[in-house]
Image: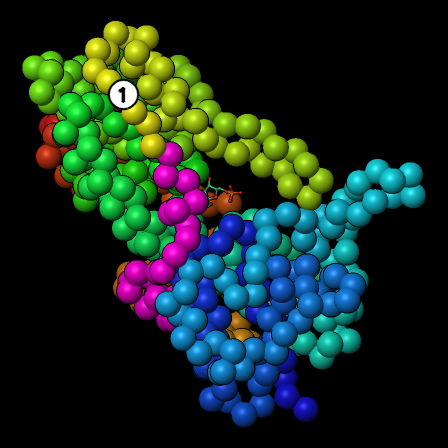
Amino acid sequence: MKKRCLVVTGGGDCPGLNAVIRAIVKRASQENDWEIVGSIDGFNGVLKDPRELRVLSNRTVAGIHVRGGTIIGTTNKGGPFAWPQQDKDGNWIEIDRSKEMLEILKEENISTVINIGGDGSQTISQNLYEMGLNIVGVPKTIDNDLSATDFAFGFQTAVEVATDAVDKLVTTAESHHRIIILEVMGRAAGWIALYSSIAGGAEVCLIPEIPYDIKKVKEKVEERTEDRRGFANIVIAEGAYPKHGSVVGQEVDEIGYHNFKLGGAGIRLKQELGDAGAQADIRVTILGHLQRGGIPCAFDRILATQFGVKAFEMVIEGKFGEMVAYKNNDIKSVPIKDAINTYNLVNVHSNLVHTARGVGISFGDLKPIMEYAT
Ligand code: F6P
């Protein structure tokens, strides 16, 4: 009987997930004694009745590396430790079904798991590993906010989408002599905003790592718009906030889903600029989930393929409780427990920030560039 390895995609989707799945299946097919099984919608496929488990063959995964999303689906709600269920009075509660899940995996003859997901999913991996499950993690995030890996797949694609948006907004801002604000994703990290500001040539880049002073933002855009023929493009990360202020978003506290959902930083900025007396016409674009969908760029396909091959080889080698990582241009493995809850934020003294300042991009603090020298 073949050994069976379960593949799970959890949390928000991200371009490159399918390339990882394909690489795992293709690599496993070169070993005669392995079968790869996909769980539909995260671990829900194992826990649902009837179960939703699909054997993945080379034929199933043919050509999927170019497709966004994940062919096995994902979820950022619930999970084995917080499964939503109605109690006898009809109230929704969360129950821990992790032990039951391990029993189901045994029953299905599944001895190993590859869990592809971000920080939340890898916390689940670590907890299951501590319960005795043979599990390997694969990091994914468009936010680039995991410090255990120099890059995760999905980020470069998100940067391409955001840069394309800046390019398009520059031409319309120029035609109408407007200030256009683009809000991008990234949670507490400003990577997508920083990369797309440099690549697209924005005038202002606002990131969570540098709380902004609205007067400085106004000064910068007015430098560009005072002759009424100018224009300015601002990229703001969803997690950016003013000095002495806080992030904009909404606390979501639903059964199986507890999160602070960021959103609205761009609209607030428009309001703040208006209140500060900015005269130009201001428009706001929220890029949203476009950053997460569609075709992964070549870099992300390649990185995802490297991650998939490595993850399956870690399964063969028995490197459980470890996560694949891209470090110093090499593919390595790191303990999952060291990888979770350690975030990669923009270093405000880095060369990238220095470069942005060097081409005149304002972070809403407008100090002379040399004050920021490392
Ligand atoms: O972590 C990826 C991400 O896209 C963040 O950039 C964003 O804040 C969040 O997920 C959006 O989540 P949801 O898909 O639940 O709206």
- Model colouring: rainbow
Boundaries of the magenta span = 286-309
Image quadrant assignment for residue 359 = top left
Indicate whether 335 appears above or below 199: below
Can you give x and y, in whole percent of width and height, for residue 123 in the image? 58, 52
Asked whether residue 366 appears in the rendered view, the answer is no
Please name the residue shown 80% across and 47% down the image: 85
Indicate whether 43 appears above or below 275: below
Asked which secondary structure carries label 1, the reply is strand
Please name the residue shown 54% across and 76% down the image: 315
Please name the residue shown 40% across and 26% down the image: 265
* Kind of residue at badge 1: Ile
Name the foreground residue: 341 vs 45.
45
Indicate whether 228 appears above or below 117: above
- Residue labelled with disc 1: 282
Which image quarter is the N terminus in?
Answer: bottom right
Farthest-out residue, right: 88
Horizontal side, residue 321 vs residue 150: left or right: right
Horizontal side, residue 73 vs residue 165: left or right: right
Helix, strand or loop for the magenta stretch, by majority: helix
Name the foreground residue: 100 vs 66.
66
Please name the residue shown 78% across and 63% down the image: 49
